[in-house]
Structures are given as structure tokens and as C-alpha cells.
């Protein structure tokens, strides 16, 4: 039976969806939007399915971009994916933005490399890949503070890559809002489809990397 | 109204789902985030949103399991679409949309405050119109409830909600969060007459309320009670008792005035987390002359059953929302009332 995966992503200023049937992308939409993904996402999914003549009941799985990226966008996509998964009784597979960029853009996928994603305040999120797979936990910081993470890699791929490579490491920079979201969400669909072969995936959860901003309560006088 | 409705709620710090058939609550699951926020002395919106997104589907599954139903046996999906902390509201709305798209079931966006305000219809089948006092951590208003979509605001707080004041007082006195139960517990050993806290706005006509001055008065009382930089346990109990008494007395007097503005009311009902406070309930019970109703505690605080109930009333009226249903951080129940809170660029909060 053909595996049919509906994938979507709202990890930055966009709303994007792709429908994978077997090995072919049979429908896609990508729209730039700074806000309004909560209103736009589900109608967009319906359009992609309708154009391809596919119903929700035909899906084998949901693929969803889990970031890192815009916290609100990640939650919009992940909450919808988990709702669809429960409603359809099919798995939802979370794919990181690092994995999608690596799969779609790496010039040398099996080399030891760092994939970078733009973070607020000119910082970057970083993920190491070796042998074609992510290794270790993702990190974030100012590009200037990432020397240790970059010590032994052959190449750096992604947002602000030129600054990270500092001329010493081979850099494959991507535009801050790149790669084009259509390519990214198609990669999410393909990776999700491939991941299904590994058995039941865990429920998707946003990959925030950064802890929530929350200050502990102010001290109060002791009680005796 | 015998529909089987799934209700989803995630507008503050409780992730909740419930299944209702008519007025029968088949399940009512609440996953509280109290422990998550305890160290911060209040609900941290980003932490709340993070928890909701990973708990909503689990709560829905559990609610269906306890109701011994599958989604195929549900007639509609109702979800809180505002007002509230937008991260949580969005997560709830998106989860509900996913469920509705997958199943083809009708989706109904419910105003969280309508959920509270219609609860007496779920529990006691109260006929319209009735007077509702909504008192929680985020809200405080008197409403004349005329129908599932008909609310007239008679008055409300001009600054803080009483639940917020309880939390703040608990913080100031080194008590645990949430502050309501902690202050109530501590107040049992205290003398309410030991401090004369203000009864805000009683000198002003109408039934508007204010609690920010009361918080300041508590802070001043605490600082005046310090002995060698520490607060004596007895003084803390007295402050709690006097504060609670001030809130209860003020709410009771304002309720009397609200009832006078609404002589056609068939009942006087209270809802929201603050209604869990026994001293406040006792004071409100004495307001009369119409019957006083306070839903059981589990239906006073945030829950999915109230959203399912409001959804089923709206379903009966023919309401259906589209997949473009927008989560709304601000959503006043009475669109005709002048804004009292947050009346800036983004419009009235509630």
C-alpha cells in the first residue's frame, strides 16, 4: 500500500504544507505570514488534500516541523498534528528544522557537520550531524561563542553559516528564511515517511532549545 | 440538548477535557500545572503554553477512555477559543481543529467566561435570566445571563481580580501558590478583626469592584507587623483572616447591589475559582432573596465540562465554527459594555 504523509510547518514567518504519496510530492502550499497561522493552517491542509484528490482518511501519517523556531508557530503546528493524529488514529512524526535543512541542503550529508538555524537576538541554534544523523543535543548561543562546537567539523550549513565558519570552516550559508519553505516541508514529509519504518514514533513535541523566560518569585520576610 | 459533546479547555494553567451527554458528565479530566508554576509565584504564560501543547491530546484520550466512548460516538467538539493566555488557547483550538478535521465533527468555539457563566444551567437547569458573579484569578464581573449568547455586564473589577489578589497576598506572606487555598487555610487561625482593611468602592454607587488597594493595604500591614525582620505566625493568620473578610464582605455587598439592578433574575449564581472559598460562599449565600447557587468545586474552577455544556447550548442554537476559527486573547462577553480592563490598543480584555 502506498504511504501517504501530510506534512506541515509553521516554524518561522510562514505556513507550509506538503503531501507525499509514495515517493512523490503530490501537493504543496507555502505562504509567507508573520501571524495568522492558527487561522490559515487547517484551511491550507484541506486545500492541499483536495487538490490532490486525497481525504484525511487516506493518510498513513502526519509529519510536522517541530523547530527550533518561533515558539507560537511550533505550538500551532504540533497541537494540530497531535489532534489530527488522535482523530485519525495514525502516527504523527516530529521532524526538526535541523533534520529538514540537512536532508534538503547538505552538500555532503555524511560528513561531520553543524546545521545552524537563526535564533532571536542574532543568536543561532546548532545541531551536530555525523554519518548522516543528528548527534547529541542541540545548542544555542551567539555565533562568536560557538568555537568549541565547531572545533572538529568539516562544514557548517545553515543560517549565519558564513559568520560561524569564520573562513576556517567550509560554510554553506542559507538565507535567514531559507531554504524555501516548500523545500523544507517536502523534506519533513519525506523524513516522516522514512521514520515510520522504525516503528511507532514518540508523540511530536516542540523543540524549543531555549528555556522559557521566567523569573523566580521575589523573596519575602521569614515567618516565625 | 442531549448531544454528546467533547469539551476542551486550556486558557490558563489547567489542561482539561470532558465528555458530556446532555447534562450527564461522562468524564471530566483536569491536568493541573500548579507544580510547574509554584516556584514563580504565579502562572508563567510560556511554561503554561509548553505544558498545554503536550497534554491536550492526552487529556482528550483520557476523557474518552473514562467515558467509554470513541470519537465516532461524539456529536461535536467544543473548545475554549478565548479569552485567556493566548499560547494555551491556541494549543487548545489547534488540537480541537485537528480532531474536528480528522473526524468531520462540528467545531464550536466557546468563550471561556460563557463556560463559567452557563455552569448553573448544567448543574441546576436554572432558567434564564439569572445573575452571575464570576470570580477567578483572571476575572471578576457581574453578568445578567439571558441566553447562551446573551450577557449583560452589570459591573466588574476596575483593576485586579480577587483570585489574583489572593495569590499576591499569599506571595507577600510567604504562603504557597495557588494563594486561595493557602490564605483560606491560614485564615482559620486568625482574627479577622485584628486589621481593618478597606472595603473598596463601597462608597461608590453601582457594583464595580477594585482589589489593588486591598493588596497594598496587606503589604503595609505585613511590613508593620514585622518583628526583628520576621513576620510572626499569628500576625500572618490575622492578616489572612482580615483580608478574606474584606473580600467576602465587599463581594456580598456588591452582589446585593447587582441583584437590585436585575430584579428579573431567577437565581444568583457564582462561579470561578474564588467561589471555592468557604468564607466567601457563606457571605454570598446570605445575599438573597433569590436562590443562591454555587456549583461543586470541580465545576467552579477551570474544567472541560463547562466548555462542553456551553458548546452543547450553542450547538442547539445552530452555531458551527469553521477551520479558520481564531483564538482570541481578549473576548468580552458583553460587546456592548464599556471596556473596564485592558481597554488600550488591543481592546477590552473581558
Image (cartoon, coloured by chain):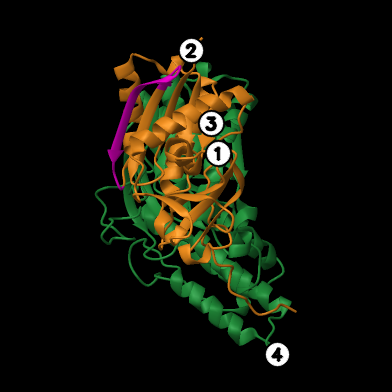
Q: Which residue is tagged 1?
A: A110
Mainly helix, strand or loop, the magenta region? strand
Q: Which residue is tagged 2?
A: A2
Q: Badge 2: few (under 14), some or many (20 or more) residues near its Cα, within 10 Å?
A: few
Q: Badge 1: few (under 14), some or many (20 or more) residues near its Cα, within 10 Å?
A: few
Q: Which is more N-terminal, label 2 or label 1?
A: 2
Q: Which chain contains the residue that carries disc 4?
A: B
Q: Position of residue A13 (x, y in %)?
A: 33, 46
State yes or no: discs 3 and 2 in contact (Cβ < 8 Å): no
Same chain for labels 1 and 2? Say yes or no. Answer: yes
The one of B136 and A117 positioned closer to us in this rendering: A117
Most distant residue in the bottom direction: B228
| Quadrant hosting residue B94 | top left
Q: Which is more N-terminal, label 2 or label 3?
A: 2
Q: CA distance from mark 3 to mark 1?
A: 23 Å
Q: Which is more N-terminal, label 1 or label 3?
A: 3
Residue A224 shown left or right of residue B209 in the figure: right
Q: Write the residue at 45% across / 71% down.
A: B212
Q: Which residue is tagged 3?
A: A93
Amino acid at each position: 500500500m502506498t504511504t501517504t504523509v501530510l506534512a506541515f510547518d509553521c516554524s518561522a514567518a510562514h505556513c507550509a504544507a506538503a503531501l507525499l504519496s509514495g515517493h512523490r510530492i503530490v501537493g504543496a502550499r507555502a505562504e509567507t505570514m508573520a501571524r495568522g497561522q492558527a487561522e490559515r493552517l487547517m484551511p491550507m491542509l484541506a486545500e492541499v488534500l483536495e487538490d490532490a484528490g486525497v481525504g484525511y482518511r487516506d493518510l498513513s501519517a502526519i509529519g510536522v516541523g517541530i523547530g527550533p523556531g518561533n515558539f507560537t508557530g511550533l505550538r500551532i503546528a504540533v497541537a494540530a498534528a497531535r489532534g489530527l493524529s488522535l482523530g485519525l488514529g495514525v502516527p504523527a512524526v516530529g521532524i526538526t528544522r535541523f533534520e529538514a535543512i540537512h536532508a534538503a541542503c547538505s552538500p555532503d550529508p555524511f560528513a561531520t557537520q553543524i546545521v545552524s538555524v537563526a535564533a532571536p537576538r542574532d543568536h543561532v541554534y546548532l545541531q551536530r550531524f555525523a554519518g548522516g544523523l543528528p548527534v547529541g543535543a542541540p545548542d544555542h548561543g551567539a555565533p562568536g561563542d560557538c568555537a568549541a562546537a565547531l572545533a572538529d567539523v568539516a562544514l557548517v550549513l545553515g543560517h549565519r553559516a558564513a559568520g560561524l565558519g569564520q573562513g576556517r570552516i567550509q560554510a554553506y550559508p542559507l538565507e535567514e528564511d531559507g531554504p524555501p519553505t516548500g523545500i523544507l516541508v517536502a523534506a519533513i514529509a519525506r523524513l516522516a515517511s522514512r521514520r515510520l519504518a522504525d516503528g511507532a514514533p514518540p508523540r511530536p513535541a516542540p523543540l524549543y532549545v531555549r528555556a522559557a523566560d521566567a523569573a523566580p518569585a521575589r523573596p519575602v520576610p521569614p515567618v516565625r | 440538548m442531549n448531544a454528546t459533546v467533547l469539551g476542551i479547555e486550556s486558557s490558563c494553567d489547567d489542561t482539561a477535557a470532558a465528555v458530556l451527554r446532555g447534562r450527564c458528565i461522562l468524564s471530566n479530566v483536569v491536568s493541573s500545572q500548579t507544580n510547574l508554576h509554584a516556584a514563580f509565584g504565579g502562572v508563567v504564560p510560556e511554561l503554561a503554553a509548553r505544558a498545554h501543547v503536550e497534554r491536550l491530546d492526552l487529556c482528550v484520550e483520557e476523557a474518552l477512555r473514562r467515558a467509554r466512548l470513541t470519537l465516532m460516538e461524539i456529536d461535536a467538539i467544543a473548545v475554549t477559543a478565548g479569552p485567556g493566555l493566548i499560547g494555551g488557547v491556541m494549543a487548545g483550538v489547534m488540537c480541537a481543529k485537528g480532531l474536528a478535521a480528522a473526524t468531520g465533527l462540528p467545531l464550536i468555539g466557546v468563550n471561556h467566561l460563557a463556560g463559567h457563566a452557563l455552569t448553573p444551567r448544567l448543574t441546576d437547569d436554572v432558567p434564564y435570566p439569572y445573575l452571575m458573579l464570576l470570580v477567578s484569578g483572571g476575572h471578576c464581573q457581574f453578568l445578567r445571563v439571558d441566553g447562551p449568547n446573551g450577557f449583560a455586564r452589570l459591573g466588574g473589577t476596575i483593576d485586579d481580580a480577587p483570585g489574583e489578589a489572593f495569590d499576591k497576598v499569599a506571595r507577600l506572606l510567604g504562603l504557597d501558590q495557588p494563594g486561595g487555598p493557602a490564605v483560606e487555610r491560614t485564615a482559620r487561625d486568625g482574627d479577622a478583626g485584628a486589621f481593618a482593611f478597606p472595603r473598596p468602592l463601597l462608597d461608590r454607587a453601582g457594583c464595580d469592584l477594585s482589589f489593588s488597594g486591598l493588596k497594598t493595604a496587606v503589604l503595609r500591614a505585613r511590613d508593620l507587623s514585622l518583628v526583628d525582620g520576621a513576620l510572626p505566625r499569628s500576625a500572618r493568620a490575622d492578616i489572612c483572616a482580615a483580608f478574606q473578610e474584606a473580600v467576602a464582605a465587599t463581594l456580598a455587598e456588591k452582589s446585593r447591589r447587582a441583584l437590585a439592578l436585575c430584579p428579573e433574575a431567577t437565581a444568583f449564581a457564582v462561579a470561578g475559582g474564588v467561589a471555592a472559598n468557604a468564607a466567601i460562599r457563606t457571605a454570598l449565600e446570605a445575599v438573597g432573596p433569590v436562590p443562591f447557587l454555587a456549583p461543586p468545586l470541580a465545576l467552579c474552577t477551570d474544567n472541560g465540562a463547562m466548555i462542553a455544556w456551553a458548546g452543547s447550548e450553542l450547538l442547539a442554537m445552530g452555531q458551527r465554527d469553521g477551520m479558520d476559527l481564531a483564538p482570541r486573547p481578549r473576548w468580552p462577553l458583553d460587546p456592548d459594555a464599556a471596556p473596564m480592563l485592558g481597554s488600550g490598543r488591543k481592546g477590552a480584555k473581558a
